């Protein structure tokens, strides 16, 4: 099943279909409705045509203004683009230039700790909450059958991962399945991850601690998602409380979301 979720693109990585996941009460997410992804700037003409034929109509870009400027999205012919930055800068460090990244890791090589802080910020930052609220507005507007909405950041794992987790949770997908989808990034990004790590290891003067720091910044771990979930429960009591109170979603919104995306 995991292989069928990874879309067969020439120059895109970590592009994944969210259809087919089962809810707690026996429904399933429709296919050709939801795609999570990494950056779109390297897509080939064949990739754009493939996505257009697949039904991609809405693109939501979670990256920072700097990331967007450095690597503008390539949009399929019938796609509509929405720029929706989660952070003013990329707190997850996945878009930072190698030299700048290593300078940061010289000051603090603990990439694992930095990622835990970033995941906490994804939940408590008020701008991030407003962004994810708007994300749900676009999801609720995507009501035509077999019209796909794609959401992405640079690596498609952190800002996109939390967006996917909130969405899947709102649809009633069990937390165990949400975790499995989150961790699938590692399989869907194998080549890019190896390239990033090779570039880091080849950098003059890099230390083993910094290599570990880069590895942890570029990876997904269960404890990253757990940090987000624990933070959510701490400030809102539950996922449901967070969706209602912090993301300002009504019961009607959640009912409509299920009507649009579940069989």
Image (spheres, rainbow, N blue to C red):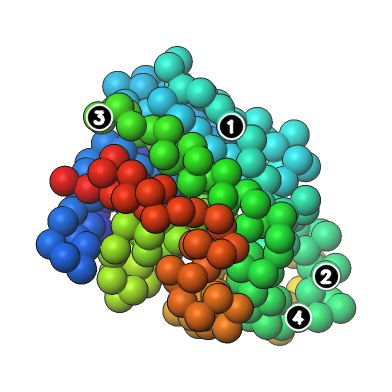
Circles 4 and 2: CB atoms closer than 8 Å: no
Question: Disc 4 and disc 2: Cα gap in Å?
Answer: 8 Å
As rendered, which of 5 and 209 lies closer to the eye? 5
Number of other residues with Cα within 10 Å of mark 4, as a class: few under 14, some 14 to 19, many 20 or more: many
Residue 138 horizontal/vertical position (percent): 49, 37
Residue 9 horizontal/vertical position (percent): 36, 36
**In the image, which is nearer the foreground, mark 1 or mark 2?**
1
Residue position for label 4: 109
Residue position for label 2: 104
Residue position for label 3: 145
Q: Residue at x 38, y 28 (%)?
A: 56
Where the N terminus falls, by quadrant?
A: bottom left
Sequence order check, earlier mark of 1 and 3: 1
Sequence order check, earlier mark of 4 and 3: 4
Residue 58 at least partly seen? yes
Query: Residue 37, labelled with which disc?
Result: none
Question: Disc 1 and disc 3: Cα gap in Å?
Answer: 20 Å
Secondary structure found at label 1: strand
Sequence order check, earlier mark of 4 and 2: 2
Q: Residue at x 52, y 68 (%)?
A: 242
Residue position for label 1: 82
């Amino acid at each position: 099943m995991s292989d069928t979720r990874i879309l067969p693109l020439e120059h895109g990585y970590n592009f994944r279909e969210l259809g087919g996941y089962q809810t707690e009460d026996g429904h399933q997410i429709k296919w050709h409705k939801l795609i999570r992804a990494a950056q779109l700037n390297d897509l080939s003409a064949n990739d754009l045509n493939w996505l257009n034929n697949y039904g991609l109509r809405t693109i939501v870009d979670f990256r920072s203004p700097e990331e967007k400027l450095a690597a503008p999205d390539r949009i399929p012919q019938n796609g509509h683009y929405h720029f929706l930055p989660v952070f003013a800068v990329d707190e997850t460090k996945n878009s930072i230039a190698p030299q700048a990244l290593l300078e940061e890791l010289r000051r603090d090589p603990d990439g694992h700790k930095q990622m835990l802080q970033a995941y906490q910020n994804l939940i408590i930052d008020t701008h991030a909450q407003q962004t994810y609220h708007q994300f749900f507005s676009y999801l609720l507007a995507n009501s035509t059958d077999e019209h796909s909405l794609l959401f992405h950041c640079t690596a498609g794992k952190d800002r996109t991962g939390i967006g996917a987790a909130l969405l899947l949770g709102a649809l009633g997908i069990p937390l165990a399945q949400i975790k499995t989808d989150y961790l699938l990034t590692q399989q869907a990004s194998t080549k890019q991850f190896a390239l990033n790590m090779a570039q880091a290891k080849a950098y003059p003067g890099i230390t083993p601690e910094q290599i570990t720091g880069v590895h942890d910044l570029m990876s997904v771990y269960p404890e990253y998602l757990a940090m987000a979930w624990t933070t959510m429960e701490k400030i809102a009591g539950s996922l449901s409380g967070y969706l209602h109170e912090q993301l300002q979603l009504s019961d009607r919104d959640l009912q409509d979301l299920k009507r649009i995306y579940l069989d």
